Amino acid sequence: MIQTDILIIGAGPTGLFAVFEAGLLKLKCHLIDALPQPGGQLAELYPKKPIYDIPGFPEILAGDLVDNLMKQIEPFQPGFTLGERAETIDKLEDGTFIVTTDKGTKHHAKVIAIAGGLGSFEPRKPPISNLAYYEDKGVVYMVKDPEIYRDKKVVISGGGDSALDWTIYLADIAKSVTLVHRRNEFRGALDSVDKVQELKNAGKVELITPAEVVALAGDEKLEAVTIQRGSEIIERHCDYFIPLFGLAPKLGPIADWGLEIEKNAIKVDNTLDYQTNIPGIYAIGDINTYPGKLKLILCGFHEATLMCQSAYQRIFPNKRYVLKYTTVGGVQGFDGSKKEAPKAVVKMIE
């Protein structure tokens, strides 16, 4: 059985940063994730997509952010159970927990932090009769490596940020990009809408609205799509069709753990520590909900920080923790390594 102080369910950016904050408090962490690698959606769905709202980084690729977070937590030697889904939680008489995965791996923890992002999720698929046949034969629901589309003909369908962002990004990579949306209006950021319009005006992308992709064709792989715009039928040869209609989030087994759920998210107390209705179980990041909740990575970082402070008090109720800034105390890893604070800074503060 795996023993740890804090068991983090979900190895996305919020869960990874929680390891760092817990490490500063000398708390050991172990993470469970159904995906085969850390990083959550950032690693699985859009590792090459730029993110613009991480403090200190005007722009950073999602995959690079994951790499940085993994490097940041190296000194605290977290454990990982990857490719397995947390299935059941049992609370023991002493207030600790046993979490068992779908493959039977058991974890014993003093505190649980659920950082499962949107939970388990699957792409929303358009109602095209032979869609399943072309999956992995030209139909893809997420862009992991943009280089796959270099010099290829790509048709994207959707009207949100992902459809707009990838249309912009692939315009300089693919041989041709066609964006199809069933409305003339888009739901994405206005700046992205303007950029797509500029690319259309420059002849770099084709924009077909209001329209829908209604049929796919090809023998062993996708070769063409049929687009319907009113009574008009448009045929486009393509190598890839990327329908980007968002994800359908599902809590999965989490919904059966006795937690208070609201609109497919876990209710927490945000006045103090993001604890759920079960003492000792916290929920941080996109998986939780509370008045004024914003589903942003930076908000997840904040929630993880306060959660770790509360977890420390729960694990060590008789100890008083005095906050020490890393600029003063440095970072002491479990492996004995230490990043010292600059002496000039220490002297100035003293």
Image (cartoon, rainbow, N blue to C red):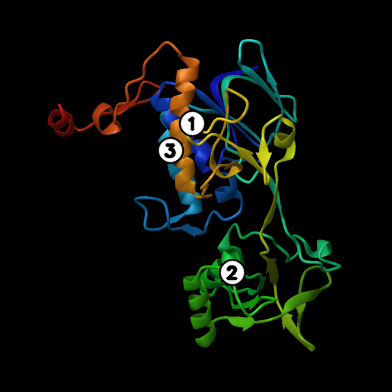
Neighbours of disc 1 within 10 Å: few (<14), some (14-19), many (20+): many
* Upstream in sequence: badge 1 or badge 3: 3
Residues under numbered marks 2 and 1 in contact, where contact means CB atoms less than 8 Å apart: no
State the residue at coordinates (61%, 81%): 207
- Using the image, determine if residue 155 lies above or below residue 265: below
Circle 3: residue type? Lys
- Using the image, determine if residue 128 lies above or below residue 69: below
Residue 232 lies, in percent from the top left, at: 77, 89
- Using the image, determine if residue 287 lies above or below residue 164: above
Residues under numbered marks 3 and 2 in contact, where contact means CB atoms less than 8 Å apart: no
From the image, state whether disc 2 or disc 1 is nearer to you. Answer: 1
Residue underneath mark 3: 71
CA distance separating discs 3 and 2: 36 Å
Residue at the bottom extreme? 232
* Upstream in sequence: badge 3 or badge 2: 3
292 or 230, which lies in front?
292
CA distance separating discs 1 and 3: 26 Å
Residue underneath mark 1: 273
224 or 21, which lies in front?
21
Quadrant that contains the C terminus = top left
Residue 96 lies, in percent from the top left, at: 61, 16
Residue at the right extreme? 129
Q: Is 296 placed left or right of 156 in the picture?
A: left
Q: Is 333 placed left or right of 82 in the picture?
A: left
From the image, state whether disc 3 or disc 2 is nearer to you. Answer: 2
210 or 81, which lies in front?
210
Residue underneath mark 2: 187
Q: In this orientation, does residue 224 appear?
A: no
